[in-house]
Image: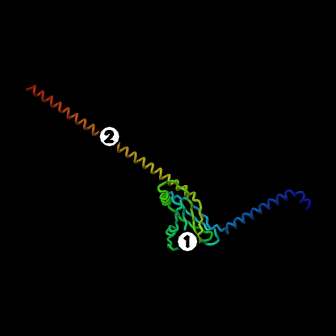
Amino acid sequence: MPEFITDNLGFIVIGGFVIGFIFMITILRYNLYMSKFFSNKKFRINSAYNLEPTEDKRSFALTIFNNNVNDTRVIAFGFIYKNHSLNYHKAYLKENKLNENYKVVIQSRDCLEITIDANELKILISDINRGSRRVGRLKAYVADSSGLTIKSKAKAVKKQLKQLFKFEYLADKEKKALIRAQIKEELKAKKDKRKFEKRQKRQERLKKFKLKLKSIFTFKRRKKGL
């Protein structure tokens, strides 16, 4: 046996090192999982963009996960934009047909989700911007009954809002171009009408002048015939 160990000492050392390394990684991963499980960071917020192709309906989904081991009551959630809180707590109650005094509680390891109409949010952002189509810093947030507020960047929502404002700009640009083309066409039609009327008047004056000349020559011929 000692001869076997001596002959294969290098392989035994390498094998022991590999096993020890795997064991340490397993322990670290387990500790990381347990630290997350018992984390004091209560919430994780996800915000995403949804499109229903058959109905051409655009919306945003705001999902709030309760990472804590305890159930948590939330009193406000939504978006923060330029120091304005867009709170969808009442909208959530209405969407789920709940009483206004209903206490919204997210159970441990569970989540809350609300669907927000994309155009409605775009209008709110536009009002805050006072008509500007530029989208500034946008964050999703949630506040619990103890006063703790967690914020998270709403990148997907902000990106899609930019696209919606871009589509609106292009639509307005196309609409204005059509109006300009229509006005130009109307002005051209009016100009052509005036030209036609002037031409008609000239032709009528010329016709009257010819008739007058004809009547004069006819009168002279009759006079000579007498």
Query: In the image, residue 43 lies at what x, y percent?
Result: 61, 66
Q: Is any atom of residue 185 visible in this view? A: yes
Q: In the figure, residue 150 lies in which quadrant?
A: bottom right
> Residue 2 location, x and y as percent?
91, 61
Which quadrant: the N terminus?
Answer: bottom right
Residue at 58% of width from left, 57% of height from top?
155
Q: For this rendering, which residue is in front, 38 or 14?
A: 38
Q: Quadrant of the C terminus?
A: top left
- In three-dimensional space, the C-alpha distance between marks 2 and 1, rounded to whole angstroms, equals 70 Å
Residue 92, image x, y percentages = 52, 68
Q: Residue at x 12, y 29 (%)?
A: 219
> Is residue 10 found left or right of 33 in the rendered image?
right
Residue 4 found in image quarter = bottom right
Relative to 119, 217 lies left or right: left
The residue wearing badge 1 is: 104
Viewer-nearest residue: 140 or 3: 140
Residue extending furthest toward the top: 224
Q: Secondary structure at mark 2?
A: helix
Q: Badge 2 is on which residue? A: 192
Percent x, y of residue 62: 56, 63
Q: Identity of the amino acid at label 1?
A: Val
Q: Amino acid type of disc 2?
A: Asp
